[in-house]
Image (spheres, rainbow, N blue to C red):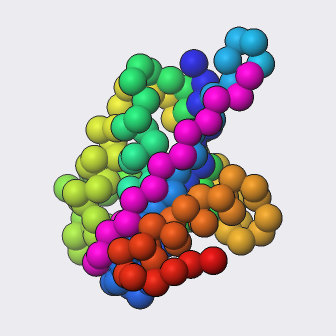
């Protein structure tokens, strides 16, 4: 089964109220598109944590091993895998090349666990550039962030 996972994260302040938005898409053998949306807000978080949570949530929703194409505007998430950052962090015991502890280790470990049963590739898209699913994920994320902050988004 092949799935597309679109994700975005948002934070109103860094740290501050934040949220993520995730879309899972699957085309069945009849050619019909199946789609699910997920979002959640957090009272005190960072943009990077929300970027990670969006991908985690999508992967954790998959109930059997899949081929997953992750699409995100987060270079933080995409480069960790495509540029091999995560391999270095693991080799150095979750320390960066600067010898400092990697931020958000709890979520990186959760992401690796959620990713484990799947075959996953990562593609970066420019944010706020008209990519339909990225724009929808951004809207889901900002609405979730605004919901926990008491703001009303348009």
State whether the magenta stretch is mostly helix, strand or loop: strand
User: Dividing the image into 4 quarters, which one contains the N terminus?
Assistant: top right
Foreground residue, 56 or 149?
Answer: 149
Along the horizontal axis of the image, is 110 left or right of 36?
left
Q: Place residue 130 in its image quadrant.
A: bottom right
Picture residue at 44% right of the left edge, 21% below the top? 65
Q: Is residue 36 above or below residue 13?
A: above
The answer to whether residue 152 is above or below residue 120 is below
In the image, taking residue 14 as reference, residue 103 lies left or right, namely left
Which residue reaches farthest top?
29
Residue 138 counted in the magenta span: no
- Between 54 and 37, the residue placed more toward the observer is 37
**Residue 93 found in image quarter:** bottom left
Residue 14 image point, x, y percent: 38, 85
| Side (left or right) of 75 relative to 27 | left
Numbered label tally: 0
As for residue 33 lying within the magenta part, the answer is yes
Q: Residue at x 40, y 46 (%)?
A: 57
Who is closer to the viewer here, 78 or 11?
11
Residue 66 position within the rendered picture, expressed as x and y whole percent measured from the top left: 50, 23
Task: Please tell me which residue is depicted at 32% across the width and 69% down the height of the picture.
Answer: 42
Q: Is residue 54 left or right of residue 123?
A: left
Residue at 63%, 77% (x, y): give it. 154
Q: Nearer the viewer, residue 85 or 2?
A: 2
Give the magenta-colored segment's residue range. Answer: 32-50
């Amino acid at each position: 089964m092949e799935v597309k996972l679109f994700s975005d994260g948002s934070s109103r302040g860094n740290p501050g109220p934040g949220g993520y938005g995730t879309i899972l898409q699957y085309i069945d053998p009849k050619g019909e598109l199946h789609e699910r949306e997920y979002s959640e807000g957090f009272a005190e978080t960072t943009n990077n944590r929300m970027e990670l949570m969006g991908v985690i949530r999508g992967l954790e929703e998959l109930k059997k091993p899949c081929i997953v194409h992750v699409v995100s505007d987060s270079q933080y998430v995409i480069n960790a895998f495509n540029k091999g950052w995560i391999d270095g962090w693991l080799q150095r015991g979750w320390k960066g090349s600067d010898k400092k502890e990697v931020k958000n280790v709890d979520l990186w470990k959760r992401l690796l666990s959620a990713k484990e049963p799947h075959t996953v590739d990562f593609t970066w898209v420019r944010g706020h550039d008209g990519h339909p699913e990225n724009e929808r994920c951004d809207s889901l994320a900002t609405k979730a962030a605004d919901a926990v902050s008491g703001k009303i988004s348009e």
